[in-house]
Amino acid sequence: MLSILFKTLAVVALLSLSLCTIKALQDHAKDNGDIFIINYDSFDGDVDDISTTTIAPRAADYVDFDEVMHYCNASFITPMSNVLQFNTTGALPDENDKTSMCYFHCFFEKAGLMDNYKLNADLVRKYVWPATGDSIEVCENEGKDVTNSCGRGFAIIKCVVLRALTDARNNPVV
């Protein structure tokens, strides 16, 4: 009789330990950010409340260009057609469009590509084009005679983009 009691206690203890271990593993999975275990008994069907992965770590010089674009476009509303034309030709539809010039100046400043009319060579080479030769120095000297800050910044940016487009045509990556 005593042995049956010990066996029963041993089984109960083992089950309790197993349940505690399972609960601990579930809690760990919920807390580590990599996996989310759904308790289907309380799940209301709203998948927006579920986080399944952690955000990937970003490089120190990572630039969220969508965020920069939205930030600058909030102050300097520029049609996407102007942005696309400038990115493919290096020219704006209206070369006197100060709003678009201010947008691109804001974009380069906010993205960290330019600060106080000085180009960040590392970021320009990483995100725009691996500027060859004297491109950085030559472009920084553009627009020094322009009194409007957006116009001066735009002159530098236009130089960078035109040189990048020229390099891309002369040295195709494909």
Image (cartoon, rainbow, N blue to C red):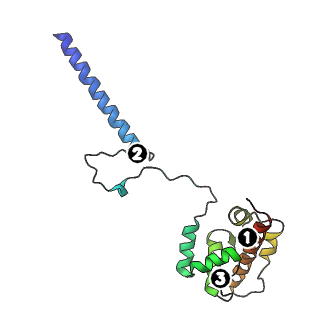
On the image, which quarter does residue 102 sit in?
bottom right
User: Label 2 is placed on what type of residue?
Assistant: Asp
Instruction: Determine the image quadrant of residue 19.
Output: top left
160 lies above or below 122: below
Q: Quadrant of the N terminus?
A: top left
Real-space Cα distance between discs 2 and 3?
A: 47 Å
Q: Which residue is the site of mark 3?
A: 101
Question: Nearest the camera: 89 or 98?
Answer: 89
- For marks 2 and 3, the one nearer the N-term is 2
Residue marked by disc 2: 31
Residue furthest left as drawn: 1
Q: Residues within 10 Å of mark 1 (few under 14, many from 20)?
A: many
For the residues labelled 2 and 1, the Cα–Cα distance comes to: 43 Å
Cα–Cα span, label 1 and label 3: 17 Å
User: x and y percent of residue 109 in the render?
Assistant: 65, 73
Q: Secondary structure at mark 3?
A: helix
Q: Is residue 52 above or below residue 3?
A: below
Residue assigned mark 1: 119
Amino acid, disc 3: Met
Whichever of callouts 2 and 1 sits on the residue coming sooner in the sequence is 2
